[in-house]
């Protein structure tokens, strides 16, 4: 059975409006690089990937500290680690470029799925805008998280499937599975379907279907000596964005889907699925079913103690944005007179823009915070110098720091994450770090709670630089 065909008129519309893909990618890369110059801020996880990428090039991978292991960011960053000091910049440029490119792919997917050929551009515009103002795409791109790459792979897989290129679709799903394990079941199930479709190519199909979980587990074993270190780290995560701490974690995950996209996207997506059901549009129903199953899987995992953070829903959120674009075009196509349809299109666009501006306003505030975080990291490198330099800091013992600064300090000191003490949940009764150590203390707003001083610990102030205070702690 071949992949389900998409209406030929959608193909023609897309070909007429689509510029050369290489031009689009080049433009995304240029803008991505420009945004890094504007706010070069990496988050906690991204700094960990930089550390692991550097260790991977030195054959000394240690994944026992920091966030849960995730292979694709590390494998992609490893070549950057050979360029001294530029790895964070290059990674951030790649992620922000991917975020821009994902918006383009959402528009393309909406055109391919649209059943209203005259309104293909309308479907593209609503899908692209919905993804652009989704809650987590701009924020994860801002701090160098891997979610924008995940969206690129998910939408590229969808487009490859619709173009009747099952092996390419499977390859993109496999790449996405190196970022989120929720894609492993889809990779295996789609691999089985591909094997039935192309029995002569079962070997490469099996390799693609199974490579994500195998690579994930093997590298985690190499870096930690165990097969479940990443899962244990995720289960131990009780941060503020974890749904596992809710009374019913599964329901909390479902509720967070409403925060992942703006409300008009959910409404238009529901309308699109109702119309698709009535018209027997199996392609759109398949995409909707995939989004629902993905949310359900994250919810079930959260019920069993996994994090269930809202950003884990960015894949189904992107699919809903595509579906909503199709729904907007289908709904507007039902309006007869052209003048009335134009007014309805303008009204719907105003609703999307009005709600989306609230998200963009929040993103603007995040940009100022990101700039401050970037400045704080620059000050951290000078604070290390004020403390006597790397060797002087390490000679005292494993340094301690506010929890969110652990990975950045490990990068700065060229240490494994396990050799930097992030004072998670630090209280005077349970400081969660041990002297002797040089202690780097920043305000709580960006770096997390300050390392608390336990009983019997003597501290001596070494100095300060910018927002950082430096102490030497001993018993």
Image (cartoon, rainbow, N blue to C red):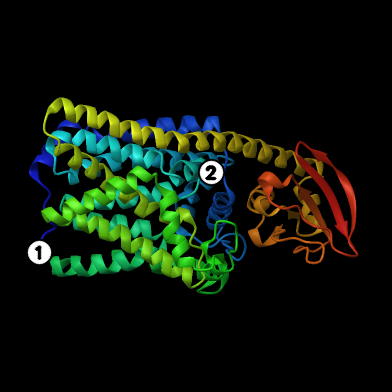
Q: Is residue 132 left or right of residue 453?
A: left
Q: Is residue 452 left or right of residue 218?
A: right
Residue 50 visible in the shown view: yes
Check the picture and name the quadrant holding the C terminus. Answer: bottom right
Q: Position of residue 10 (x, y in %)?
A: 13, 41
Counting the numbered discs, the total is 2
Residue at image coords 32%, 64%:
293
Q: Position of residue 272 (x, y in %)?
A: 22, 49
Which residue is at the front of the view, 103 or 195? 103
Residue 159 visible in the shown view: no
Check the picture and name the quadrant holding the N terminus. Answer: bottom left
Dot 2, crowdedness within 10 Å: few (<14), some or many (≥20)? many
As helix, strand or loop, the secondary structure at mark 2 comes to loop
Q: Position of residue 144 (x, y in %)?
A: 51, 45
Which residue is at the front of the view, 294 or 348? 348
| Residue linked to disc 2 | 143
State which tag comes first along the sequence, 2 or 1: 1
- Distance from disc 2 to disc 1, alpha carbons, whole Å, reads 43 Å
Which residue is at the front of the view, 442 or 416? 442
Q: Position of residue 260 (x, y in %)?
A: 43, 49
Q: Is residue 319 left or right of residue 215?
A: left
As helix, strand or loop, the secondary structure at mark 1 comes to loop
Residue 293 to residue 116: above or below: below
Residue at image coords 39%, 42%:
98
Residue 114 - label: none
| Residue linked to disc 1 | 1
Residue at image coords 35%, 35%:
351
Residue 32 to residue 224: above or below: above
């Amino acid at each position: 059975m071949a992949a389900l065909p998409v209406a030929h008129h959608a193909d023609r519309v897309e070909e007429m409006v689509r510029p050369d893909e290489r031009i689009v990618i080049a433009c995304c890369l240029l803008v991505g690089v420009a945004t890094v110059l504007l706010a070069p801020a990496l988050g906690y996880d991204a700094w960990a990937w930089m550390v692991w990428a550097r260790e991977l090039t030195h054959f000394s991978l240690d994944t026992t500290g920091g966030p849960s292991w995730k292979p694709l960011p590390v494998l992609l960053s490893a070549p950057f680690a050979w360029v001294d000091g530029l790895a964070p910049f290059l990674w951030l440029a790649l992620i922000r470029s991917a975020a821009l490119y994902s918006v383009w792919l959402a528009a393309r997917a909406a055109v391919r799925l649209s059943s209203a050929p005259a309104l293909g551009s309308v479907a593209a515009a609503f899908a692209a805008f919905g993804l652009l103002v989704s809650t987590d795409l701009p924020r994860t791109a801002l701090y160098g998280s891997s979610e924008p790459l995940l969206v690129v792979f998910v939408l590229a897989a969808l487009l490859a499937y619709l173009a009747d290129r099952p092996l390419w679709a499977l390859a993109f799903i496999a790449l996405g599975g190196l970022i989120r394990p929720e894609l492993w079941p889809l990779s295996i199930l789609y691999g089985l379907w591909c094997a039935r479709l192309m029995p002569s190519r079962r070997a490469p199909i099996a390799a693609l279907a199974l490579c994500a979980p195998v690579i994930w587990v093997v590298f985690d074993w190499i870096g930690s000596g165990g097969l479940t270190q990443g899962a244990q780290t995720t289960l131990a995560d009780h941060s503020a964005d974890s749904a596992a701490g809710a009374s019913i974690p599964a329901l909390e995950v479902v509720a967070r889907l409403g925060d992942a996209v703006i409300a008009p996207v959910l409404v238009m997506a529901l309308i699109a699925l109702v119309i698709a059901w009535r018209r027997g549009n199996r392609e759109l129903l398949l995409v909707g079913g995939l989004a629902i199953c993905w949310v359900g899987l994250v919810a079930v995992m959260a019920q069993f103690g996994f994090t269930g953070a809202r950003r884990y829903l960015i894949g189904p959120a992107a699919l809903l944005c595509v579906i909503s674009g199709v729904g907007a075009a289908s709904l507007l196509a039902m309006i007869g007179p052209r003048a009335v349809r134009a007014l309805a299109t303008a009204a719907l666009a105003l609703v999307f823009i009005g709600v989306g501006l609230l998200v963009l306003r929040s993103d603007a505030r995040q940009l100022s915070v990101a700039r401050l975080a970037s400045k704080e990291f620059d000050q951290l490198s000078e604070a290390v110098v004020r403390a006597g330099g790397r060797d002087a800091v390490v000679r005292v013992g494993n340094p301690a720091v506010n929890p969110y600064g652990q990975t950045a300090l490990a990068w700065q000191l060229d240490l494994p994450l396990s050799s930097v003490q992030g004072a998670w949940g630090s209280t005077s009764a349970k400081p969660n770090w041990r002297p002797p150590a040089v202690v780097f203390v920043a305000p709580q707003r960006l770096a997390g709670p300050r390392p608390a001083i336990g009983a019997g610990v003597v501290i001596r102030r070494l100095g300060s630089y910018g927002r950082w205070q430096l102490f030497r702690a001993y018993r």
